[in-house]
Amino acid sequence: MSALEIRNLRKAFGGLQVISDLDLKVPSGQRHAVIGPNGAGKTTLFNIITGWQPPTSGEILIQGVPAKQGRPDLVTRGGLSRSFQKNMLLESVTVLENLRVACQAFDASRRSIFQSCRSFTDVVRKARLAAEQMHLDTVLHRKVNELSYGQKRQLEVAIALCAEPKILLMDEPAAGTSPDERTSLIKLINGLSPELTILLVEHDMDVVFAICDIITVLSYGRVLATGTRDQIQSNPQVIQAYLGQRHA
Amino acid sequence: MSADVMLTSERRAGAMKPLPLPASRRAYAALLVTIGFGLCALPSFVSGYVMTLAVEVMIAGIFASGINLLTGYTGLVSLGQAMFLGFGGYGIAIGTALLGWPLWISAPVTLVVVAAIAAPIGAICTRTRGVEFLLITLAFSQMFYGAAIKLRWTNGSDGMTGIPRPDLSLLGMSADNPTVFYYYVLVVAVLSLLMLWRIVTSPFGSVLVGIRENERRMMSMGYAVANYKVGSFALAAVICAVAGILQSQYTYFVNPDAMSWQMSGEGVLMVIIGGANVILGPFVGAAVFVVVKQALSMITEEYNLFFGIFFMLVVAFFRGGVLGSISALIGKRQ
């Protein structure tokens, strides 16, 4: 059974067909990249998978179960978590609080009204561990709006990991980061559990090649090619549509 | 996937260190104790007029605290919370004066009924956000305000009288005595504050703050955001209803004006003046609001004009309200 399976997916905004007859299978544990030029439909695909936008038609199966459309919270609870292209963080609270709230979402304490957050030490412990995992333990008590951009990108991924997902969708995690931050982020992502299935959208091909085993190329909402790094790099259609000669 | 995988035992030990108590928190606790002693001793030092003002401040502070839960903590700016202030007043009036129930039954029944009414209203209102939320809460409030004016069995615009204060004869006291009533309101205010403090420091409260900060992120984390917003709306309504009960006991009277949009607007002003998402902010805002308004009204009949100028100055120079600005100043110095 695939961790994520997309069948015959279509999405249109009025007369504009953004995704057409898209099929995609991502087996468990695979690191799979979706690349393509701007407007290829990558982020729309992510938004549909995670329940933020309804598809016009088609089916999405997360671990064999149809995804709940219009309920991103239930998609996350179904084992699929995502990081966003633009940072979506709780800016005026601390890094620890961001992670604690993220960990709390899967704890029975989340509806508790008359007990202090601090009394749920397991949740705080998980949050601290998630911070350590993404090397954010030195900035635990800093407010998010005081962090560097690279640290915010790391926090994006850390929050997504707090859901202990089976599938992680990352939308341009390295966008806007410095070369050093990018190298660090690649190392962190490659250090994640090999059982975790990753679907990555990224423009930086060095990041894609450093993380992913399989690459799907989208162009105008259609799958242009799917294959390994070597297959994609030598595909003339992909070179023409997206990669150019530098990565060929 | 377990986060434990990458950790060494040393790092794990470091991760479990307790959080240090910030100096600002200790200062805040000391301030609270001082204010507490001051309020307990107040009737011994001040005139009846000042005590009356203090009662008004405390009732307004509870009302504004309810608004703060919704506006400051959840990020939902409402112009309709006065309807719940009115529900509290009318609830206790109907229970005691109309149905003849004792106060100790009428009060909890009123609060349960308010929560039961607020939940479906909240479910409708929280489907909107921003200006739409503000307008739909205003619309609901005006709808009930209009109904209260027309309803004959609650005496329409004349309102209802004969609302009793608590029977404290067992303690050898009468709540009709201004000093006793002051302490009664003080106890209810402290209990309301403690309840609110517990709510905002709870996991539920942290979700509300998350919703205020970034609703999409909270949904993406796995929270059913709509349910939390309705919960916040209902809890805020109950707190406003507590203020409504006290207000009607204070004046022995309730009329539709308690539900007017001006009342809701004043509550929002108190939150802004005192500091949104600061637990004591609404009380400070209520104190500033009541005292400044009283002082200006003694000087000129056009006090609303000067109060408007005062409000603009607060917004311009005390971003985050009085308490919010003080907290920010302490934070910078540290």
Image (cartoon, coloured by chain):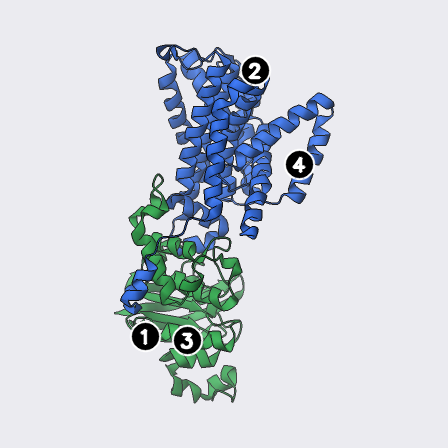
Please give the label number shown on residue B311.
4
The colour one sees for chain B in the rendered image is blue
* Number of the front mark, 2 or 3: 2
Q: Report which residue position mark 1 lands on.
A: A30
Q: In this rendering, do the residues under marks 3 and 4 share a single chain?
A: no
Vertical placement of residue B145 versus A57, above or below: above
| Label 3 crowd (10 A; few <14 / some 14-19 / many >=20) | some
For disc 2, the chain is B
Q: Nearer the viewer, residue A2 or B225?
A: B225
Name above or below for residue B111 compared with residue A89: above
- How far separated are the C-alphas under marks 4 and 2? 28 Å
Q: Is residue A20 visible?
A: yes
Query: Marks 4 and 2: same chain?
Result: yes
Task: Residue A117: give x, y in percent of width and height.
Answer: 36, 46
* Helix, strand or loop at mark 2: helix
Residue B213: where, in percent of width, then height? Answer: 49, 51
Secondary element at tag 3: helix
Q: Which residue is mark 3?
A: A186
- SS at circle 4: helix
Tell me if B138 is positioned left or right of A84 in this view: right
Q: Which chain is green?
A: A
Asked if disc 3 and disc 4 are in contact, CB closer than 8 Å, the reply is: no
Q: Same subunit under labels 2 and 3?
A: no
Q: Which residue is mark 2?
A: B48
